Image (cartoon, rainbow, N blue to C red):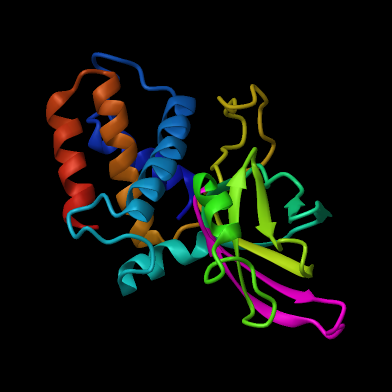
Amino acid sequence: MLNQAILLKVQQRLNKLASNDYDNIESWQIVEAFNKGQVDWSRRNLHGMNTMKEGDEQSTSRIDDLQLLLHPFPLAMSQRPKWYESNPLPDDYMRWKRVSTSAISNCCPEPRSMVVYLTEEGNVDVLLRDKNKQPNFEWGETFATVRDHKVIIYTNGEFDIVNPMLTYYRQPRKIEIEGVVDPYTGTTPTADVECEFKDDLIELLVDEAVKILGGDIESFNQSTREGQSVETNN
């Protein structure tokens, strides 16, 4: 869907297509509201805060809508005595999905696939001491945590990590409109950047943007109506 169509749809639902009564909604405000709506909608549905209580990959609809945001990212790791620490997570990181990696040891130089479980940082010391849960090269299992915007994969000093890959949900790509000041950077784009979601989902994101703008201009009816529309059609 073209950005100009998004502008028209938002203006129409705010009843400002033919007149700018009450408040003059600028194009940059619509862009800001739409981009905020993309993030709000994505986080809400990844977490399952919708009428169907469906989080990511819990239904075909959630897979169809959110798979576009899944992104692989090779991790560059630094070795520590009992773990490997990654480079900082990418700027567009939004939500963890999984880490896949291989490992080698002194007795087995050929890389073998490992299963990596995400765990809480507060449980690390307990897990490292537990014979049933500590990193184990023979069983092909270990665990990881996220701290200081980095991925930590634990080895207990028993093996080395090879070719780790993080799969994560990234932030949605922000739309930009040629000649309209970008409210995030203060620059003026020289070309359009269109929404990457499919058209039926963009219709919901238009309603999300109108809900935000309706609240900003204290238009209770429009904010409520569009909020209900987003969830009813979700």
Q: Where is residue 129 shown, x and y percent of the image?
A: 58, 59
Is 233 left or right of 139, judged from the image as shown?
left
User: Residue 17 versus residue 65: which sits nearer the camera?
Assistant: 65
Q: Is residue 24 magenta?
A: no
Residue at image coords 71%, 63%: 155
Q: Where is residue 32 shown, x and y percent of the image?
A: 46, 30
Magenta span: chief secondary structure: strand
Count of numbered circles in the view: 0
Residue at image coords 53%, 53%: 126
Taking 99 as reference, is 41 above or below it? Answer: above
User: Residue 9 versus residue 160: which sits nearer the camera?
Assistant: 160
Q: Is residue 108 magenta?
A: yes
- Where residue 66 sits, quadrant-wise, is bottom left
Quadrant where the N terminus sits is: bottom left
Quadrant where the C terminus sits is: bottom left
Is residue 171 something that shows in the picture?
A: no
Is 78 left or right of 183, judged from the image as shown?
right
User: Residue 8 versus residue 182: which sits nearer the camera?
Assistant: 182
Is 146 left or right of 231, judged from the image as shown?
right
- Where residue 225 sits, quadrant-wise, is top left
Q: Where is residue 232 shown, x and y percent of the image?
A: 16, 54
Q: Which residues are magenta?
A: 97-120
Is residue 210 something that shows in the picture?
A: yes
Residue at image coords 56%, 37%: 177
Q: Where is residue 205 shown, x and y percent of the image?
A: 35, 47
User: Residue 140 versus residue 42: which sits nearer the camera?
Assistant: 140
